[in-house]
Image (spheres, rainbow, N blue to C red):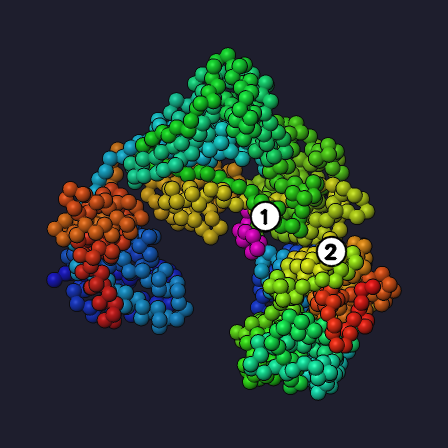
């Protein structure tokens, strides 16, 4: 005989609007073994929690059912509530009468009926629950941060300052990310390099940060507290331990490649650093443009290097890292706008993409900070087109969030550096950040012309060859604008990195419908992921500006500390175990497990489950033909009883 | 400034008539910026959507400008089905008696005679002069003749060319009986859904009774209606696609050299943007010896509209407000002496423009099928090329 208490939450009107809560309580009181049933407006609040605790004591309850929101939301809360009274925390059952009941119907009859059925099932299940003991594991205190943009840099510095060892893994030859490509940042217009390069240098100097540039994570194994990560160090063909950064090699190198850093607007030497303030200040050889790799001879760099640092024999190497937690901060790409033929990008030389323009403004860029067109002339009139591929069902439905503001910044810089007339073609101006509206007003007063209508097409001018014509409706006057300009800047959609899917698989993340990495909860767990111990920060989670990116990075660092600041941690007890006496060794469990927890013991001819890897999803138990696997807390008996209860109602 | 009061009941009526899409629009103006009418008329498609969102007075004065070319729909960042919306708006207002004079004759003829050309239905197959059999269930293809090909003297030549080509390829085919009527495409775009349903039901009766499985259509408007609005699973193939297939299969072999004539091709909106057929007509043209094929600047997905869709064929447009005139000028600018296309509406619009622009000596309007027939150099019992030779 169990002594069950049922506690039904109104959640304000969230539940009560489409579920008659009192009727649920009355119903629960009629069920066998239920000794008390109560309702409360907000069960998760302090008075609600106390109500449960008092009843546990008063009625000597040994099972507690809370009918409220999703267990994802408050299972942990209520487990603590009952544990505080001395009851084993696994004797709690959550009934989801919000997400799966009241929120999915507008019919109060249907909602109430479903709520009763769920409670009936939960009572059946609760009777069969047994107390479980949580596992305690050792925690590795080191941290891996993936991505060396502003998010990764900020998180790494913060964590390193607490004394933890941080590995900062960056794919390209320098840290800095997109922010290092910018000239100025909105809305304050402070110089991007002035605020970023000191941080880049701090990373290089920090004794607790192991900076791993030109590296990629190739494998992630393990679990929270104990990740095993393999990092590939791509061959640089330069021994960075010997190199003294004199860059004599770059000076003499005849090989010319395309500079990704300058968005293809400039050439770079085959052996070079991406830009003068790059960190590290040591070059790598680009195989695709190196004369030796292409033609089999040259090796000029080798001859001029006094340090004997050039090593054409260098191979990719692999490094194993152990860490307790991971931050993924892999950033973004800009959409390729070539397929949008109406805008002529890639065909009409006067059409530029936003990042190209960032490089034109930058004093370390291809034009030394002068705004000139591809033919070297200065534009006399410039149109900036918002929302190219963003907010667009044919391309990317999301708002890219920063384009309004950087387009305003572009307008300001164009006004400062040229005498051009500047036009903005926009749909809605979004200037909701701190100081952003003020910036918008400032740019309006700088006599930038705002045309409320999305740029529809760019054509070559018939009257003035070489000039462009922007076609759009000014929706305010309903006039069809045909604006001749010398330069068009497209503000394209911010999209997930081209390799985001690979990163997602490797770290076992999920993604939203746009391909950005998904947070565990949009409001209350914005930096956690569905994988314990892996956190996300910056634009890989969704478009955002630098202040928000930095705030997320700091938040992710704090999240990481909650794990690595302790040397041990408690894990869920709801894992699967194998009864070796019944196991037939078929290895179905090994095949179905998404986490690699089961393995086959050839000597004993049975499967075994590594509890540290097991997440308790139960797939193995369902796949086991001999019922040798028991999913604790979701045993066959418990699940079947719950179904019986549901069917009975 | 005039005072306007939102009249949401009107907006709701438009939604109820199939204009649900108006709720999605965020008024960015991409449609107006893309619309081929924008530079030459006062028609403003975005404003029409806006007025419909609020049910503002004056919608009826703005709703006839659209020729349903689908350029705006393809570009719309919100996925608004603008053509459905235009149809719904017209349906609400034209049912309320707001049909313009020029369309009254069109709708009247559709209602009384089942075709838009005031033709005698009994004479629907007269162009064939009894030479071709009627469709029966044992035949492979129904060769559906568009009303415009059956009754319009210029387009009759396309009907004849089509029949000659199908015979030359040795296909088993027949014509519909005179019991059928117009597919109803333009009528549905004008907003008369009731009459459209009547025409559709009558045609379906013929299709069902005669177990039609495969249909050849020379008009992209028939193609669109039969595939998207009739709800049957028969196969409908546009003539240009069939001809391209027959050439590939070696069943039709163009031999006669047309002597190096410069030919350009106009993508009909309902063949291209509406049904994504871009390559087949070009393949046919390029298979013909002695054709120097040249593209106009605006082609394929970005093709210009002739202005004949959405009821436009039956509406009067002032000089300077005709898209077909602009398209002829564009074709002339390429140096082409033949403007080929694959739609009876486009042919009608262009023939009119060539006449009013006095360009008859400079450029000929041809259906792709007519050019192919010329180059087959076969003896057609009755010459079809009496008004449409290229020389």
Residue at the location (33% across, 30% down)? A320
Residue A17: quarter of image: bottom left
**Which quarter of the rendered picture does the C terminus of chain A lie within?**
bottom left
Residue at the location (35% across, 38% down)? A220
Residue at the location (73% across, 32% down)? A376
Q: Which mark is residue A430?
A: 1
Position of residue B144 measured from the top left corner of the image (x, y, whole percent): 64, 76
Between residues A239 and A45, which one lies in front from this camera angle? A239
Left or right: where B150 falls relative to A59: right
- Tell me the element at label 1: loop
**Which quarter of the rendered picture does the N terminus of chain A lie within?**
bottom left
Number of numbered discs: 2
Residue B209, above or below A277: below
Discs 2 and 1 lie in a common subunit: no
Position of residue A308 measured from the top left corner of the image (x, y, whole percent): 47, 14
Most common SS among magenta residues:
loop
A102 within the magenta span: no
Position of residue A121 measured from the top left corner of the image (x, y, whole percent): 24, 65
Left or right: where A112 falls relative to A379: left
A398 within the magenta span: yes
The chain ID associated with circle 2 is B
Tell me whether the residue at label 2 lies in contact with that at label 1, contact meaning CB atoms closer than 8 angstroms: no
- Tell me the element at label 2: strand
Which span of residues is magenta-colored?
A: A392-400
The chain ID associated with circle 1 is A
Between residues A436 and A351, which one lies in front from this camera angle? A351
Label 2 crowding class (10 Å Cα cut-off): few <14, some 14-19, many 20+? some
Residue A111, above or below B193: above
Q: Is residue A343 visible?
A: yes
Q: Which mark is residue B293?
A: 2
Q: Is residue A158 visible?
A: no
Position of residue B313 measured from the top left corner of the image (x, y, whole percent): 74, 72
């Amino acid at each position: 005989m169990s002594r069950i208490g049922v506690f039904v939450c109104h959640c304000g009107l969230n539940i009560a609007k489409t579920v008659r809560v009192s009727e649920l309580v009355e119903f629960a009181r009629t069920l066998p073994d239920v000794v008390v049933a109560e309702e409360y407006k907000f069960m998760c609040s302090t008075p609600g929690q106390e109500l449960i605790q008092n009843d546990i004591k008063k009625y000597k309850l040994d099972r507690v059912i809370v009918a409220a929101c999703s267990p994802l939301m408050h299972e942990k809360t209520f487990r603590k509530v009952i544990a505080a009274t001395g009851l084993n925390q696994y004797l709690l059952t959550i009934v989801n009468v919000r997400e799966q009941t009241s929120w999915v119907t507008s019919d109060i009859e249907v909602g109430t009926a479903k709520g009763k059925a769920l409670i009936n099932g939960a009572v059946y299940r609760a009777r069969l629950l047994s107390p479980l003991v949580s596992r305690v594991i050792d925690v590795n205190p080191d941290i891996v941060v993936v991505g060396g943009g502003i998010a990764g840099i900020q998180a790494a510095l913060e964590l390193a300052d607490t004394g933890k060892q941080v590995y900062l893994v960056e794919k390209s030859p320098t840290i800095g990310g997109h922010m290092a490509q910018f000239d100025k940042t909105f809305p304050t217009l402070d110089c991007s390099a002035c605020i970023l390069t000191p941080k880049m240098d701090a990373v290089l100097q920090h004794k607790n940060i192991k900076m791993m540039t030109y590296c990629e994570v190739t494998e992630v194994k393990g679990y929270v507290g104990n990740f095993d990560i393999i990092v590939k160090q791509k061959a640089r063909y330069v021994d960075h331990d010997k190199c003294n950064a004199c860059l004599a090699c770059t000076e003499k190198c005849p090989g010319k490649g395309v500079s990704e850093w300058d968005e293809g607007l400039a050439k770079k030497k085959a052996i070079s650093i991406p830009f003068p303030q790059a960190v590290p200040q040591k070059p790598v050889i680009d195989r695709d443009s190196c004369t030796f790799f292409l033609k089999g001879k040259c090796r000029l760099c080798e001859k001029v290097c006094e340090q004997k640092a050039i090593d054409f024999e260098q191979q990719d190497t692999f490094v194993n890292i152990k860490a307790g937690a991971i931050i993924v901060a892999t950033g973004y790409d800009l959409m390729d706008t070539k397929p949008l033929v109406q805008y002529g990008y890639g065909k009409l030389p006067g059409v530029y993409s936003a990042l190209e323009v960032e490089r034109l403004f930058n004093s370390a860029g291809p034009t030394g900070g002068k705004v000139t067109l591809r033919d070297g002339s200065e534009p006399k009139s410039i149109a900036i087109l918002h929302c190219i591929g963003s907010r667009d069902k044919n391309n990317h439905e999301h708002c890219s969030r920063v384009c309004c503001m950087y387009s305003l910044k572009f307008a300001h810089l164009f006004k400062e550096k040229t005498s051009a007339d500047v036009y903005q073609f926009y749909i809605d101006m979004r200037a909701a950040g701190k100081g952003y509206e003020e910036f918008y007003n400032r740019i309006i007063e700088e006599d930038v012309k705002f045309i409320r209508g999305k740029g529809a097409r760019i054509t070559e001018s018939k009257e003035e060859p070489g000039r462009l014509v922007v076609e759009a409706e000014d929706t305010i006057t309903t006039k069809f604008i045909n604006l001749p300009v010398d330069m068009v800047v497209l503000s394209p959609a911010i999209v997930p990195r081209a390799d985001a899917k690979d990163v997602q698989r490797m770290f076992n993340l999920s993604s939203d419908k746009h391909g950005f990495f998904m947070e565990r909860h949009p409001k209350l767990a914005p930096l956690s992921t569905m994988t314990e111990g892996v956190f996300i920060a910056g634009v890989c989670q969704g478009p955002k500006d630098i202040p928000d990116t930095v705030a997320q990075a700091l938040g992710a660092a704090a999240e990481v500390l909650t794990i690595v600041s302790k040397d041990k941690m408690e894990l869920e007890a709801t894992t699967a175990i194998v009864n070796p006496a019944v196991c037939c060794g078929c290895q179905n469990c090994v095949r179905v497990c998404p986490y690699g927890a089961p393995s086959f013991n050839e000597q004993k001819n049975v499967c075994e489950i590594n509890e540290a890897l097991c997440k308790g999803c139960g797939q193995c138990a369902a796949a086991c033909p001999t019922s040798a696997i028991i999913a604790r807390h979701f045993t066959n008996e418990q699940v079947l009883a719950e179904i019986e209860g549901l069917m009975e109602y | 400034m005039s005072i306007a009061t939102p009249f949401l009941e009107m907006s709701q009526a438009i939604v109820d008539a199939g204009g649900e899409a108006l709720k999605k629009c965020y008024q960015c103006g991409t449609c107006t910026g893309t619309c081929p009418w924008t530079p030459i008329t006062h028609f403003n498609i975005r404003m029409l959507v806006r007025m419909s969102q609020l049910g503002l007075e004056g919608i009826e004065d703005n709703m006839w400008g659209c020729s349903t070319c689908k350029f705006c729909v393809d570009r719309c960042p919100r996925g608004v089905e603008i053509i459905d919306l235009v149809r719904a708006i017209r349906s609400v207002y034209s049912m309320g008696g707001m049909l313009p004079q020029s369309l009254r004759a069109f709708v009247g003829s559709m209602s009384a005679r089942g075709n838009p050309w005031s033709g005698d239905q009994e004479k629907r197959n007269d162009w064939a002069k009894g030479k071709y059999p009627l469709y029966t269930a044992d035949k492979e293809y129904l060769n559906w003749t568009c009303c415009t090909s059956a009754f319009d003297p210029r387009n009759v030549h396309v009907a004849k060319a089509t029949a000659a080509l199908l015979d030359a390829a040795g296909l088993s085919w027949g014509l519909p009986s005179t019991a059928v009527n117009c597919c109803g495409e333009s009528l549905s775009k004008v907003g008369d859904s009731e009459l459209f349903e009547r025409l559709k039901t009558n045609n379906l009766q013929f299709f069902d009774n005669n177990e039609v499985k495969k249909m050849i259509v020379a008009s992209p408007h028939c193609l669109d209606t039969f595939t998207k609005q009739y709800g049957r699973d028969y196969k409908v193939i546009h003539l240009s696609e069939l001809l391209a297939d027959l050439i590939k299969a070696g069943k039709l072999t163009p031999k006669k050299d047309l002597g190096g004539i410069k030919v350009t091709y106009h993508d009909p909106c309902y063949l291209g943007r509406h049904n994504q057929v871009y390559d087949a007509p070009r393949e046919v043209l390029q298979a013909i010896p002695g054709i120097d094929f040249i593209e106009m600047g605006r082609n394929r997905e970005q093709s210009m509209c002739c202005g004949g869709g959405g009821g436009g064929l039956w509406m009067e447009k002032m000089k300077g407000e005709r898209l077909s005139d602009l398209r002829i000028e564009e074709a002339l600018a390429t140096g082409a002496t033949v403007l080929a296309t694959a739609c009876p509406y486009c042919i009608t619009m262009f023939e009119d423009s060539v006449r009013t622009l006095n360009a008859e000596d400079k450029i000929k309007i041809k259906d792709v099928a007519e050019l192919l027939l010329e180059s087959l150099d076969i003896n057609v019992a009755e010459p079809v090329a009496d008004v449409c030779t290229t020389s």
